[in-house]
Image: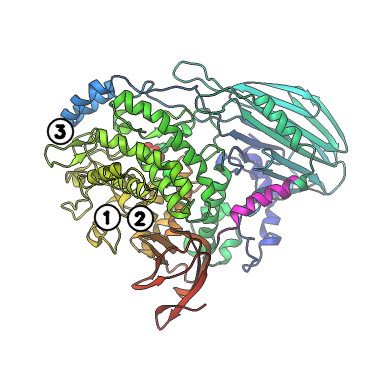
Amino acid sequence: MTISRRETLRMSAGLSLLALLPPIAEAQSTKPAGHDLRLWYREPANEWTEALPLGNGRLGAMVFGGVARDRLQLNEDTLYAGAPYQPANPDGPAALPEIRKLIFEGKYVEAQKRIDAHFMGNPVSQVSYQTIGELTLTFGPSSNASGYRRELDLTKALSTVTYRQDGVTYTRETFISPVDQVLVMRLSADTPGKISFQLGFETPQVATVAIESPQEIVLSGRNGGHNGKDGALRFESRVRVVASGGQQSTGTDELVVTGADSAMVFMAAATSFKAFRDVSGDPTAITQDQMARAATRSFDDLYAAHLKAHSALFERVSVDFGRTEAADQPTGQRIARSQFQNDPALAALYYQYGRYLLISCSRPGTQPANLQGLWNEKLNAPWGGKYTININTEMNYWPAEPTALPELTEPLVRLVKEISVTGAETARIMYGARGWVAHHNTDLWRATAPIDAAFYGTWPMGGAWLCLHLWDRYDYGRDTAYLKDIYPLLKGASQFFLDTLVKDPASGYMVTAPSISPENEHRFGTSICAGPTMDMQILRDLFANTARAADILKTDAGFRAEVLAMRDRLVPNQIGKAGQLQEWKDDWDMEAPDLHHRHVSHLYGLFPSHQITTRKTPELAAAAKKSLELRGDMSTGWAIGWRINLWARLGEGERTHSILKLLLGPERTYPNMFDAHPPFQIDGNFGGTSGMTEMLMQSYDDQIILLPALPTAWPKGHVTGLKARGGFTVDLHWADMTLERVTIRSAFGEKATLVLGDDRLPLALKKGQSATFGLRAGGLVRTA
Ligand code: FUC
């Protein structure tokens, strides 16, 4: 611990005079743009969920900002437990006929027992994402510190800590460069000779610390084991301290700086992971190389490169929902006081924080954003900190396309390529099928078999859902070379289902069996079933997108016809006796034991898909609304996040805003604005950013729908730089709850219709053209 709770209280008591005055920079409520895009606090972090996250996609740090002792909890995105493995269960093909027979006889619990005994992965668990440990900087007593402030500036991806002590102002600035692949911290003071500290490591890993010189210290270790076997990864964190003035020496397991004018700390980290079946990397060589390149350069030089790379992504979208004095308070207080209703700038901050987090935890070449993005302090993270693909990983990437961060999906696309390799083995070994399959989770080693227990893991749709993201990348970017590259993945996913869908004896429809409607127990005491609504909806998208891709690429005419024919044989969406959209093939919803279940799987058709829309399928949209009413609004963080997107699709601004309020309140948002499942899980952050986008602009069915769910709490505002399907950029300004103007830029000259309420205006923009539209006599007209 950097500083005890009591110590902090003492500190804030010491600060009480200062606390009476508004902080100098925050006094007014009209601020230059960008100023509000900071998380800031008047005391150091005690809890991990108060610390502030930095990341370059691969390296992550949580900065606590202590005065007596600072902690930076460190992550590297390939540091998972375990070793390459293939858990596919060879008993599968022999067990399947009996499992299916039991399901079609209505013996669901018996089917579940069979699955648990013969159809689960071996081992039945996947591996956990792990922390490196912590970098600790020990300074001295904090008792007489004053004027403390720590902040994270989202526009700069920079953490700053400042305070005064004995008449000296101290500053620590930290960033993690996506360009130079190191963490950089600068410690400075306004008086020469005042920088003194000891720097060391603490870690729960099996690891050793080596002091290589008075300037360099290295933590090296092995990752944790899995299923009784040792881990296969080596990792290393290498830190160099370069002081200017003063002395540098060594203590036991630590570097010592005494009386310096300023100091720079560089941290590099790597593991021996190269690919999901190659652990031959050399973390020593990698970190030595990174250090040699970075540690000779100046802070300003490194920071300039970092800022340029960050701004190139972050600055693409700006958003403003209005500002009140509530925005002048420290971030933790704004959340704790639940004054969301009167603090529209908090929603804008949360919006941009979601984009900041995605930029910080998913970049080309890195691992995709996991359940905690990149940031995890444990050896055994909640749910292993892995990739849960029955909602959570998908939600992480919902904001990527509409908020103009398409290159950040590269790690996800690569993950799908990799699970199509392991998943082809799983398809063959467990189902005797062609193509590839992934169940409800995967990890660093790209395991794809059913895990945890039949109740949770018997879901062959994880890979198929991820294929929607592959298609969406094309739909927004319209890059045929990319489509050609990913087409085999769509085709392989479709092939698996052509081989494994079975005819439901009762209805004659083709169904998945065994499957589940994710994690929801139905009236027969288990989740195990055949052909739940979500599976059918995902397959309708998969088959349609595969066929469209084949069409665009002028290939596979026979296969295209085959998937389209199979698409017509799936169970349709059905409306049940309560007027709800049925979650299952049979009308079981009202007898399910948990009517308020967090998953709303059957509403996939409304969002993220657009099979159900208020315009195209009004009855089904009304049934989806009924289902949402029955489920209720309060739930886990991500489940609230999903509900925000769904209500926005229904065009219900007030309801959407009231649910957003639940997400941003203290029960579901930690002081550092991380989403609380609880515990911390990052999907809710991304679901929130996506949901707010859906409130302002939606794009599907060749329409760009403006302000579909604008709440009265945001009567005036703007959002610029959003992306719509078909290569459009949308800059939107509104006032008095109505459109003021919208500028649309077309990258490819595709056709689309601009929609505002009932008003529809066909767009005819050529490639590279832009136009501005406004309202005249209540109707949309081109104004420039
Ligand atoms: C799914 C959800 C849980 C949790 C886990 C990581 O299983 O049902 O709520 O988010 O993923």
Would you say residue 668 is visible in this rendering?
Answer: no
State how far apart marks 2 and 1 are (Cα): 9 Å
Q: Which residues are magenta?
A: 302-317
Q: Residues within 10 Å of mark 3 (few under 14, many from 20)?
A: some
Residue at position x 37%, y 38% from top?
463
Q: Residues within 10 Å of mark 2 (few under 14, many from 20)?
A: many
* Alpha carbons under labels 1 and 3: distance apart: 27 Å
Q: Which numbered disc, 3 or 2, marks the residue that appears first in the sequence?
A: 3
Q: Quadrant of ligand 1?
A: top left
Q: What amino acid type is highlighted by mark number 3?
A: Phe
> Residue 646's mark?
2
- Kindly identify the residue that appears in the image at 47 percent across and 36 percent down: 415
User: Mark 1 vs ligand 1: CB under 8 Å?
Assistant: no
- The residue at label 2 has a CB less than 8 Å from ligand 1: no
Q: Residue at x 26, y 33 (%)?
A: 499
Q: Is residue 103 above or below residue 22?
A: above
Tell me if residue 155 can be seen: yes
Q: Residue 708 at x, y = what percent? A: 39, 66
Residue at the spot of label 1: 624
